Image (tube, rainbow, N blue to C red):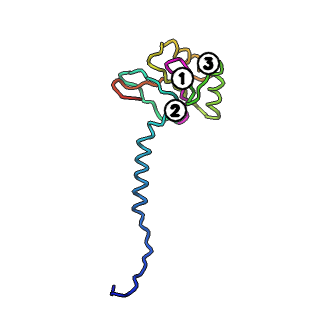
Amino acid sequence: MRLGEPTKMQAAINITPLVDVVLVLLIIFMVMAPEMRKGPDVNLPNTAKPSDQGDERGRILVSVDQAGGLWINDQSVTADNFGEALGVAVGAENNPRVVIRGDARLNFREVRQVMLAIEQAGFRGVGLIAKRAGARGE
């Protein structure tokens, strides 16, 4: 390159900043994904060794809060139309899995009533969600 000569433009794409941004976004989504859960805040009971909860595909989440209110995924429902709302939540899902998140301060009788309502709606094999003893949050 000589003094006074016009410089040539190089048409090269630098993708390093793009990769940096994408990796940062990926890390953010990986950290925040467990925090994006459905339903109300429920104080889960502690167990010494909870079983593997599996993935969330095809899973219908039924929550029972401290006051005994029923939630299907993130929608509040009444006990009267619980079966109908559960059928709507399942939709066309083949082989749906219904799991219950019951508040630790509830009596087992209240959780069992929800289990019976799910069985009366035609679902079998209801799962229960718990947290490992000593774990923070869910």
Q: Mark 2 vs mark 3: which is more N-terminal?
A: 2
- Residues under labels 1 and 3: Cα distance? 20 Å
Q: Is residue 80 left or right of residue 62?
A: right
What element does badge 1 sit on? loop
- Kindly identify the amino acid type of the residue bearing the numbered disc 1: Gly
What element does badge 2 sit on? loop
Q: Residue at x 42, y 55 (%)?
A: 21
In magenta, the rendered stretch is 57-69
In this view of the protein, which residue sits in the foreground, 31 or 47? 31
What percent of the width, then of the height, locates residue 72? 57, 27
Q: Pointer 2: what residue? A: 38
Q: Residue at x 37, y 26 (%)?
A: 132
Task: Mark 1 vs mark 3: give the one in front.
Answer: 3
In this view of the protein, which residue sits in the foreground, 126 or 84? 84
Q: Residue at x 43, y 23 (%)?
A: 44
What percent of the width, then of the height, locates residue 34? 44, 37
Q: Is residue 70 left or right of residue 81?
A: left
Q: What is the quadrant of residue 82 in the picture? A: top right
Q: Mark 1 vs mark 2: which is more N-terminal?
A: 2
Q: Pointer 3: what residue? A: 79
